[in-house]
Image (cartoon, rainbow, N blue to C red):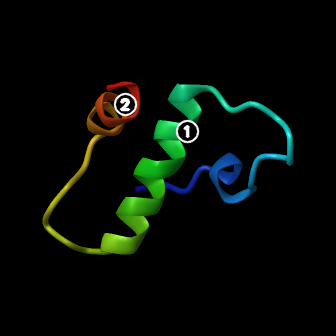
């Protein structure tokens, strides 16, 4: 997974983050934590969890 520099900086306090951006950040962090794990997670799975 290529690192997107925008994902490395945290949102400013008091700023709203779109649900899509939040899902992208969560997906990146989960992928980073899992490392080379064979289990993959998609941004769509995260979006489904956030919005339900």
Q: Is residue 43 left or right of residue 17?
A: left
Left or right placement of residue 49 versus residue 27 in this view: left
Q: Describe the element under mark 2 as helix, strand or loop.
A: helix
In the rendered image, residue 52, in percent from the top left (x then y), is placed at 32, 26
Q: Quadrant of residue 32?
A: bottom left
What secondary structure is marked by label 1? helix
Q: Residue 5 carries which label?
A: none
Q: Mark 2 — residue? A: 47
Q: Mark 1 points at which residue?
A: 22
Within-10-Å neighbours for mark 2: few <14, some 14–19, many 20+:
some
Cα distance in 3D space between marks 2 and 1: 9 Å
Q: Which residue lies furthest to the left in this view?
A: 38
Q: Residues within 10 Å of mark 1 (few under 14, many from 20)?
A: some
Q: Which of 11 and 42 is in front in this view?
A: 11
Instruction: Work out whether residue 40 or residue 12 is closer to the camera in this orientation and state it.
Output: 12
- Residue at (51%, 27%) from the top-left corner? 20
């Amino acid at each position: 997974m290529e690192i997107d520099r925008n994902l490395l900086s945290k949102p400013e306090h008091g700023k709203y983050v779109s649900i899509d951006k939040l899902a992208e950040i969560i997906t990146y962090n989960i992928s980073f934590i899992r490392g080379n794990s064979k289990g993959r997670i998609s941004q769509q799975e995260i979006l489904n969890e956030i919005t339900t």
